Amino acid sequence: MRISSILGTAALAALLATTSQAQNTPCGGSFAAFVQGLKDEAIGMGHDPATVDRFFAGVSQSDAVLKADRRQGIFQDPFITFSRKLISQNRLDKGRQLGAQYAGIFDRIREEYGIAPGVLLAFWAFETDYGAFQGDFNTANALVTLSHDCRRPELFRPQVFSALTLFEHGDFDPRTTTGAWAGEIGMVQMLPKDILENGVDGDGDGHVMLKTSPADALMSGAKMLSHLGWRPNEPWLQEITLPADLDWYETGLQTTKTVAEWEQLGMRGRNGALDDGRLEASVLLPQGKDGPAFLAYPNFRVYFEWNQSYTYVLTAAYFGTRLMGAPAYDARSPQEGLSGEQMKALQSKLAARGFDVGEIDGILGSGTRNAVRDVQKELGLPADAWPTAALLNRL
């Protein structure tokens, strides 16, 4: 039973509309006054006052959540290093074992959403190590704390009211429900609003329990991917080999061609034929023209709705292909990249030339990649968006 069935379609729509408009309680100031403002807002939305009192009773500000938010890491390792850290033989073996153990659930996911098992298994592995480490932050405290904090209140305040609705239907306990510091819950780490919109009662017990039910977690994750735009029964990523005379400026997510057009340019699948020639796809070179190469199909872009890190997304997508039987990628011999300080120096030089690289932070984000690619072309270098010491010296 999907949670929309539990609430009723009209009630769910009304709830989502009101939570998206919950802007009446300003962030900052007295925490107690802020909580009272949230309670007044919730009652104004139609929630029962006694239920609201029970939900917010004992909610407290969490210094640990604020510290975690301030120190959250950015994936700075290059793709080869990062992917080898995350994809261990144990995770491969465990993923394949769980794929067999829950084959019936994955069959349902394929039938209803057209999503291959490896896609969900990879998220399950990376988010919580297949459910073993789901986070021990009190979720209600985390959401209210981050709503009170003025960095991103518009993101977290609607989650508070969504958690309240889950509480009303027995799927959330503000005293005992725990998860990640940013409020994600369960084996595949979903926020309360995502659970309301995409939660699926996969095991038929009348509740959506993402912490304890693999069926609920996997079916809900699949529905969320579908909601985010996953195209049923289509590929997401494939390792390729490249022609030596490729125009490297044509690579990257900003350029798409049909698979047939890439094939005409000499692109080949490293382990089997490329997919449907009519599909649009982009060539990804995470460490430049001398490193591993992938063809990213339309479904690959859905990963960025789950996580914004290019390195994380590519690693998760690649791990999904491994769990579906693809061999380890050919790392080849990419040129050495830049240290964090070298990257900052490069970003400063690019910014001085008029390129928008965003913050000078030493991170190879999309803005810096695009600037590197453009300046490489300007200087007559292979425009593969991979910054090296040679490029830094040229600048």
Image (tube, rainbow, N blue to C red):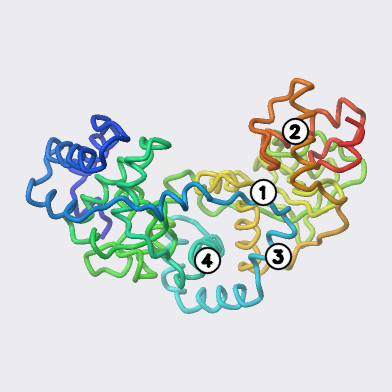
Read off the residue under disc 3.
84
Q: What residue type is labelled 2?
A: Gln
Q: Distance between the residues labelled 2 and 4?
A: 36 Å
Mark 2: secondary structure = helix
Q: Distance between the residues labelled 4 and 3?
A: 17 Å
Q: How far apart are marks 4 and 1 (CA)?
A: 25 Å
**Which of the two discs, 1 and 2, sits closer to the camera?**
2
Q: Which residue is drawn at 51% across and 69% down?
A: 129
Q: What residue type is labelled 4?
A: Leu
Mark number, residue 347: 2
N-term-proximal mark, 2 vs 3: 3
Q: Residue flagged by tag 3: what amino acid is it?
A: Arg
Residue drawn at 76 percent across, 41 percent down: 343
Residue occupied by mark 4:
121
Q: Give the secondary structure at mark 3.
A: helix
Q: Distance between the residues labelled 1 and 3?
A: 30 Å
Disc 4 crowd, CA 10 A, few/some/many (<14, 14-19, 20+): many
Against 215, residue 235 (above or below) is: above
Which quadrant is home to the N terminus?
bottom left
Question: Separation of disc 1 and disc 2 at Cα?
Answer: 39 Å
Q: Nearer the viewer, residue 315 or 136?
A: 136
Q: Which amino acid does label 1 sit on?
A: Asp
Which mark is in front, 2 or 3?
Answer: 2
Residue hosting label 1: 276
Q: Of the residues under marks 2 and 4, which one precedes in the sequence? A: 4
